[in-house]
Image (cartoon, coloured by chain):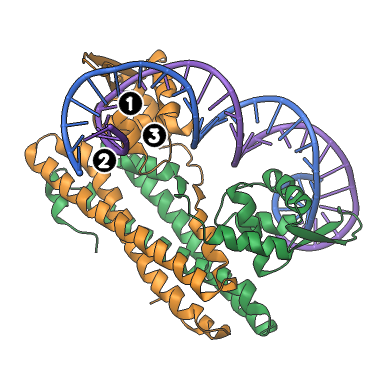
Chain colours: A green, B orange, C purple, D blue
Amino acid sequence: MNKLSYGLLSLLSTEPMSGYDLTTKINKFWRSTHSAIYPLLSELEEGNYIELTLIEQTGKPDKKIYHLTDKGKELLRSWFISETADEVCRDEMTLKLYCINCMDEEAAETLLKEYEDRCNKRIEMYHKNLARIKVLAQENPDNAPASVFGSYIMTQRGLQKTELDLKWCEWVRRIYKKKNLSFLKEDLR
Amino acid sequence: MNKLSYGLLSLLSTEPMSGYDLTTKINKFWRSTHSAIYPLLSELEEGNYIELTLIEQTGKPDKKIYHLTDKGKELLRSWFISETADEVCRDEMTLKLYCINCMDEEAAETLLKEYEDRCNKRIEMYHKNLARIKVLAQENPDNAPASVFGSYIMTQRGLQKTELDLKWCEWVRRIYKKKNLSFLKEDLR
DNA sequence: GGATCCATGTAACGTGTTACATGATTCT
DNA sequence: AGAATCATGTAACACGTTACATGGATCC
């Protein structure tokens, strides 16, 4: 049982899903690929933490809709209240931004623009996500809360952080141009 | 040459450092351990991207202070302007928060408290870091900018994001208590 | 007296990514 | 006509972490 396995249980606690759905959903919070997820799902099933319902399809492989068992729910809660590991973050952009002051203006500006582009695209994506969530909630107001809550709070969080990053970029651009220590007097506001 | 290697060059571009220093510094932006860093430094040295100055010590192993060569600086710039990989984030806390609505109030509150604790500790750490940077800048105002700029902008960014997370926690606590979809009308403000 | 910091390095292991494999349907 | 989406799965490889290894100085 590694962290990703618990993540799968976490997603499945909100609604039954296929491995394919899990892959796309979890990727927003925990970078991974289907190659890592499918074997873990088999293990979770062998351990009776999840069960599957087979949906027969033609043209594509049959769809396996997984849902938590009672044993799985117990495991989820025990993980939830156990100690939480420190986050692992590996962001190449950050590594680049760290040495931006040693780069010429052209290279520096190119990087900032690239980053701002990414932020804007992400913000757009978050807005779409919020719209999608609200439609989903209107369509079935009775059992939507569980499946919608997690996505909603995470989307709001991502949106706020990304908007902050955009402001931060402008600030970095401004103080980059001062080639002395006066930037230390300027706070990010 | 993997991403971490470039990260080491990025840090070394601001000031010469030992592998030990690099390990502690890079960890704020890119999770890694000395076991991964030392072999990469040897490779970078073999490729003549960095050179070392040996500082003899007693009791501890001799200190190896690495600095960029011209070849290393060229490599750094070519990496800087090349395409940037998407960030990799694996945060167990986020996985837990995703399913918080499926958990009982006690477990939910415990998690939120734990997260807020972490945020507060991190904020304290960032403030200390800012103070340390300002002292460093006052001590040698002439060559400090290069080594200080990166740390300063990253610390400011981390601080802002963590303060935002703290507000977010309060917001989540508030809407968690509403056991229906009305939370969708509430924005994070 | 034990923990932490400094300071380097290697080996075994676990995890994650890329590539391989298949194939119908839908969008551009 | 080609790319993307849906949908599963395995194998080889790259990468990262933990543990092993050493040892003096300093803090609590």
Measured as percent of width and height from the top left, residue D3 is found at 71, 48
Residue at 70% from the left image edge and 83% from the top image edge:
A140
Q: Chain of mark 2?
A: A
Residue at 51% from the left image edge and 57% from the top image edge:
A82
Tag 3, which secondary structure?
helix
Q: Earlier in the sequence, mark 3 or mark 1?
A: 3
The residue at which mark 3 appears reads as B7
Specify whether disc 3 shares its chain with disc 1.
yes
Q: Dot 2, how many residues are within 10 Å of its Cα: few (below 14), some (14-19), or many (20+)?
A: many
Query: Could you tell me the amino acid type at mark 3?
Result: Gly
The residue at which mark 1 appears reads as B19
Q: Dot 3, how many residues are within 10 Å of its Cα: few (below 14), some (14-19), or many (20+)?
A: many
CA gap, disc 2 and disc 3: 15 Å
Query: Could you tell me the amino acid type at mark 2?
Result: Asn
In the image, D22 versus B145, the foreground residue is: D22
The residue at which mark 2 appears reads as A101
Q: Chain of mark 1?
A: B
Q: Dot 1, how many residues are within 10 Å of its Cα: few (below 14), some (14-19), or many (20+)?
A: some
* Horizontal side, residue B15 vs residue B180: left or right: left
Relative height, residue A4 to residue A71 (above, below): above
Whether residue B159 can be seen here:
no
Tag 1, which secondary structure?
helix
Tag 2, which secondary structure?
helix
Q: Which label belongs to residue A171?
A: none
Residue A119 image-quadrant placement: bottom left
Measured as percent of width and height from the top left, residue B108 is found at 50, 70
Residue A179 image-quadrant placement: top left
CA gap, disc 2 and disc 1: 22 Å
Q: Chain of mark 3?
A: B
Query: Could you tell me the amino acid type at mark 1?
Result: Gly
CA gap, disc 3 and disc 1: 12 Å
